[in-house]
Amino acid sequence: MLDKYLNKIIRGDCLEILKKVPDNSVDMTFADPPFNLKKKYNGYKDSLEFREYLEWCDKWISEMVRVTKPTGSIFVHNIPKWLSFYVKILNEHASFKHWIAWNAPTSPMGKSLQPAHYGILFYVKEPKKTKIYEIRMPHDRERKSMYLRKDYGGKKAGLHPFGPLVSDVWTDLHRIKHNKYRDEHPCQLPVPLLERLILMTTDEGDVVLDPFIGTGTTAVAAKKLGRKYIGIDLDQEYKQISESNLNKVSSDSNIGGKWVSFYLGEIRTLRNEDWDALSKHFEIPKNPKDIDFIKIKVSKNSSKK
Ligand SMILES: C[S@@+](CC[C@H](N)C(=O)[O-])C[C@H]1O[C@@H](n2cnc3c(N)ncnc32)[C@H](O)[C@@H]1O
């Protein structure tokens, strides 16, 4: 039943398509719905009444939980205002794991605090069975000198050579600003954001489903990491953009058999448990104190799959 949707972008209303997906069949679900902020989508009016919007969200969130496996995870991305309502819906159906704050500065809004983050709610279906891995991000370095930006109070020698474990505040992954990297869509997410979630909660061959696929970001991240995907969108043009982006996926995210989030020439996320195997493919300074001076990078002769 699920097979016919695997590795496909399906044009349609997610509520209709989700009904056809069996219970407990998908390893990870991720949703980035329209925010009801009057954004200019092709085929969708982004301005429902307050209650109407929340009732609609209730339906697809419940469906996301239903199709997720007991080992699986559910992620929903939105502005904090809507997430504060989603929490109530999700708490009825699943277990809270984290509220991830994703740093994304916006323009001033008048008499309010400056909005500077989006949230990603991270829920799990059955906490004792959840599949979850520790992940690491690179150290924050000066762009040219590669010096670490923090001095760590003279304790640099004790740092992990690659970088720290990822917390629930993400300031290192940025929204796509440059037109060169964007498609014709009002709210395209960056691929490394989805790769981080996928590396944290799925294994090679697992199935990732996104009911609002837009330009295909979740599917592209899943394909890059050797996972299967199911993407749904109302709009035919977005389906085509997604398929074209999927066709461009290259296989540079596997280093010596380990999957990493590799984007614009840099590793953005890797699994902690993969570090020993991956470290062979890095140029690591012999003296740990020299962590400032040498860029850790995949050495030229490392074998990529
Ligand atoms: C916020 S965008 C998703 C952007 C996506 N994360 C990306 O990185 O490109 C929301 C998408 O949901 C689609 N959409 C709106 N209502 C839908 C529905 N009922 N079923 C499926 N897709 C829908 C819109 O066409 C739009 O592409």
Image (spheres, rainbow, N blue to C red):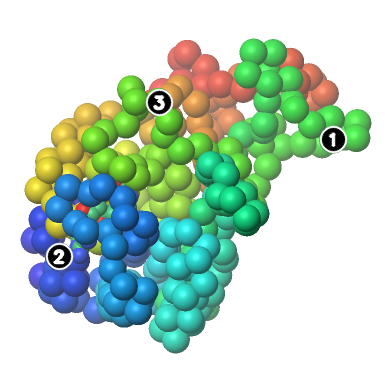
Q: Earlier in the sequence, mark 2 or mark 3?
A: 2
Residue lying at 32% horizontally and 39% vertically, measured from the top left: 224
Which residue is labeled 3 in the image? 178
Q: Tell me the element at label 1.
A: helix
Q: Earlier in the sequence, mark 1 or mark 2?
A: 2
Residue most extreme to the bottom:
92
Residue most extreme to the front:
110
Residue 56 in the image: above or below residue 240? below
The quarter of the picture where the N terminus appears is bottom left
Residue lying at 48% horizontally and 81% vertically, measured from the top left: 88
Query: How far across and how far down the image is residue 208, in percent?
Result: 30, 57
Query: How far across and how far down the image is residue 65, in percent?
Result: 34, 76
- In the drawing, what numbered circle is on residue 13? 2
Kind of residue sitting beneath label 2 = Asp
User: Could you give the CA–CA distance between mark 2 and mark 3, rounded to whole angstroms?
Assistant: 30 Å
Q: Tell me the element at label 2.
A: loop
Asked whether the viewer can see residue 294, the reply is no
- Number of numbered discs on residues: 3
Query: How far across and how far down the image is residue 11, in percent?
Result: 10, 55
Q: What is the crowding at mark 2: few (fewer than 14 residues within 10 Å), some, or many (at least 20)?
A: some
Asked whether the viewer can see residue 28, the reply is yes
Which residue is labeled 1 in the image? 152
Kind of residue sitting beneath label 3 = His
